[in-house]
Image (cartoon, rainbow, N blue to C red):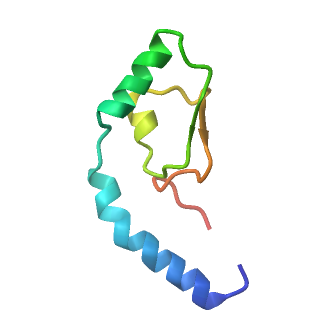
Amino acid sequence: MTSELAHNEHWEYKLEGWNAFGDANPNAVHSAIFELESSGKLSGVVTQNIDGLHRMAGTSAELLVKIHETNSQIEC
């Protein structure tokens, strides 16, 4: 947090992937996880993915634990 160089490198890295995240859609695995939730077979979903695709697939916010949050929101 105190290194301006590290801060700038991190934001450059984030900007490189921005377009890819914007075009991403849930895949069959995201849908299968949502189906398990819908059938009452899940008590939670823990993900380190930052793409937001679990929520896009329908996984409820109450069951979703995001270790690294998401790239869909930015806060400084």
Question: Percent x, y for residue 57?
Answer: 38, 31
Task: Determine the residue located farthest toward the right in the rendered image.
Answer: 2
**In the image: residue 48, left or right of residue 58:** right
Question: Percent x, y for residue 13?
Answer: 44, 75
Q: Quadrant of residue 58?
A: top left
**Vertical position of residue 72 compared to residue 9: above or below:** above
**Vertical position of residue 22 compared to residue 19: above or below:** above
Tally of numbered discs: 0
Task: Determine the residue located farthest toward the left in the rendered image.
Answer: 23
**Vertical position of residue 18 compared to residue 44: above or below:** below
Task: Determine the residue located farthest toward the bottom in the rendered image.
Answer: 5
Q: Residue at x 29, y 62 (%)?
A: 19
The C terminus: image quadrant: bottom right
Q: Residue at x 51, y 54 (%)?
A: 73
Question: Percent x, y for residue 41?
Answer: 53, 13
Q: Residue at x 47, y 9 (%)?
A: 39
The N terminus: image quadrant: bottom right
Task: Determine the residue located farthest toward the top in the rendered image.
Answer: 39
**Vertical position of residue 41 compared to residue 60: above or below:** above
Front residue (pair 13, 45) = 45
Q: Residue at x 62, y 27 (%)?
A: 62
Question: Percent x, y for residue 17?
Answer: 36, 66
